[in-house]
């Protein structure tokens, strides 16, 4: 038993490192979108194509990635994923020299394939090492913390490199892309020299079975829960920013006398605080996961997220009828600790209480992935690898749910009303925690 723990220490560290890589490369797409918007003077929606390319890659590569993992195992799949990621980021580097919008989008799409496969590897591997239940949830929560830490680092580094993002070009972001290439190169060497825990190969030839991960009701319901979670996370970040920055219904109208440029800065800082609170929540989730079951954790955080979002919708937030609070911010131009021109770590700003409530959802949302994944793959046995690939397909919720929120916004003209979509997502996740998680297909051999 002692030897087993020693053998698994390095694989756990490798998995945590891969979690960080996923966030580092993925989160680069958002600030790069602003750079692209300003450099090429494209339509605002086209600046989000890098993010969209990542989500499309998840939908396209999810199932094939699960098949690759099932056939070649954790180590080879991770090495393939890292090699693909190196190529994807390399293409983005080329776009910086060529000054090409199209080449950048291609690079973001290829990098998205890598992120999909890395997710497919690290989630089932940590679940396997943890043996299911609380321990697995705790390890996945720890991985999520690394994910948030590296993701937050991106925002800090972008702020240092691009204090004036309206004048920036892709070439200005090359140091970050070089860093990503170095991370991929280092990870490839470490994993190539590591021994990862692989599933034992059975001598039996794969049967033409009528069963698959989709034969398990609790897994199918779990994939929709992860769809809702990713959509909630991305939707909240995007629409908090859009709402507060909008010159008609945002801070400019709600707080008389505020400068439109300052309003835009505050809006971005509020969204950044959502990301920071996800890091705080995931760190707290590591300890919490050892104390309560994944089901209870999901029930608490889904219910809490729903209550906070519902309160944000129902509390009035119109010009002349809004409750304002002094909110601490992460990465704010008006901060208390200035690191350089246009950058600070912490500060405060006056915002509607609705914004504060929506940002606090980040504390709960941060723990959803680990809890849902652990519940969804419980009892799947030999189907877990392919299940992980299917799971990744549903990450496309990060693109679909914000789109639905956009349709609601277009139909109602109200940013806050669009958050009813988030409430519906929370209700579904609460249902999954209470009822949908149960494995009713225990008769299927695994």
Image (tube, rainbow, N blue to C red):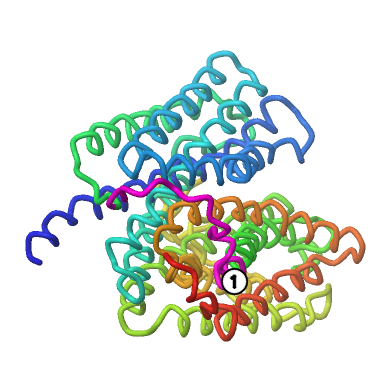
Q: Which residues are magenta?
A: 200-222
What is the magenta segment's predominant secondary structure? loop
- Out of 4 and 415, give the one closest to the viewer: 4
Q: Is residue 415 toward the left or the right of residue 387 in the image?
A: right
Q: Position of residue 153 (x, y in %)?
A: 41, 48
Viewer-proximal residue, 119 or 199? 199
Q: Assess disc 1: are there few (<14), some (14-19) or many (≥20) residues with their C-alpha within 10 Å of its C-alpha.
A: some
Which part of the image, by quadrant, shows the N terminus? bottom left
Percent across and percent down for residue 34 are: 64, 38
Taking the magenta stretch, the answer to whether it contains residue 160 is no
What residue do we see at 64% from left, 80% from top?
306
Look at 19% across and 44% down and name the residue there.
Answer: 195
In this view of the protein, can residue 316 be seen by the observer?
yes
Say above or below: 177 vs 251. Answer: above
Counting from the top left corner in percent of width and height, residue 297 is at: 46, 81
Left or right: where 45 falls relative to 94: right
Residue 248 falls left or right of residue 197 = right
Q: Which of 303/314 is in front?
A: 303
- Which quadrant is home to the C terminus? bottom left
- Residue beneath the point at 65% across and 60% down: 231
Residue at 79% in and 67% down: 418
């Amino acid at each position: 038993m002692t030897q087993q723990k020693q053998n698994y220490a390095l694989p756990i560290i490798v998995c945590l490192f891969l979690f960080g890589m996923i966030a580092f490369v993925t989160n680069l797409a958002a600030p790069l979108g602003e750079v692209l918007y300003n450099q090429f003077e494209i339509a605002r929606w086209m600046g989000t194509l890098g993010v969209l390319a990542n989500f499309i890659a998840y939908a396209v590569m999810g199932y094939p990635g699960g098949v690759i993992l099932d056939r070649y195992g954790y180590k080879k799949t991770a090495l393939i994923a890292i090699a693909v990621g190196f190529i994807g980021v390399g293409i983005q580097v080329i776009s910086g020299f060529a000054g090409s919008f199209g080449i950048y989008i291609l690079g973001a799409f290829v990098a998205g394939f890598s992120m999909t496969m890395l997710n497919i590897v690290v989630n089932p591997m940590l679940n396997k090492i943890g043996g299911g239940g609380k321990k697995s949830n705790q390890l996945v929560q720890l991985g999520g913390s690394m994910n948030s830490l590296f993701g937050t680092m991106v925002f800090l580094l972008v702020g240092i490199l691009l204090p004036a993002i309206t004048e920036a070009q892709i070439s200005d972001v090359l140091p970050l892309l070089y860093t990503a290439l170095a991370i991929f190169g280092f990870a490839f060497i470490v994993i190539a020299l590591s021994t990862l825990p692989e599933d034992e190969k059975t001598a039996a030839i794969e049967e033409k079975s009528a069963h698959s991960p989709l034969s398990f009701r609790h897994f199918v319901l779990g994939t929709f829960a992860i769809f809702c979670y990713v959509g909630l996370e991305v939707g909240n970040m995007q629409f908090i920013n859009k709402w507060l920055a909008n010159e008609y219904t945002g801070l400019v109208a709600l707080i008389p006398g505020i400068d439109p440029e300052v309003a835009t800065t505050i809006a971005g800082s509020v969204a950044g605080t959502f990301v920071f609170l996800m890091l705080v929540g995931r760190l707290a989730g590591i300890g919490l996961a050892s104390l309560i079951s994944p089901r209870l954790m999901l029930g608490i955080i889904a219910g809490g997220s729903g209550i906070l979002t519902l309160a944000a919708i129902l509390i009035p937030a119109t010009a002349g009828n809004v409750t304002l609070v002094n909110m601490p911010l992460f990465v704010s131009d008006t901060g208390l600790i200035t690191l350089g021109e246009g950058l600070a770590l912490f500060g405060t700003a006056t915002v509607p209480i609705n914004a504060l409530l929506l940002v606090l959802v980040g504390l709960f949302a941060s723990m959803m992935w680990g809890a849902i994944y652990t519940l969804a793959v419980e009892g799947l046995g030999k189907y877990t690898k392919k299940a992980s690939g299917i799971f990744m397909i549903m990450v496309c919720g990060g693109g679909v749910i914000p789109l639905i929120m956009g349709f609601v916004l277009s139909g109602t003209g109200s940013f806050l009303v669009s958050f009813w979509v988030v409430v519906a997502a929370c209700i579904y996740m609460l249902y999954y925690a209470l009822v949908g998680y149960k494995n009713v297909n225990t008769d299927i051999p695994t």
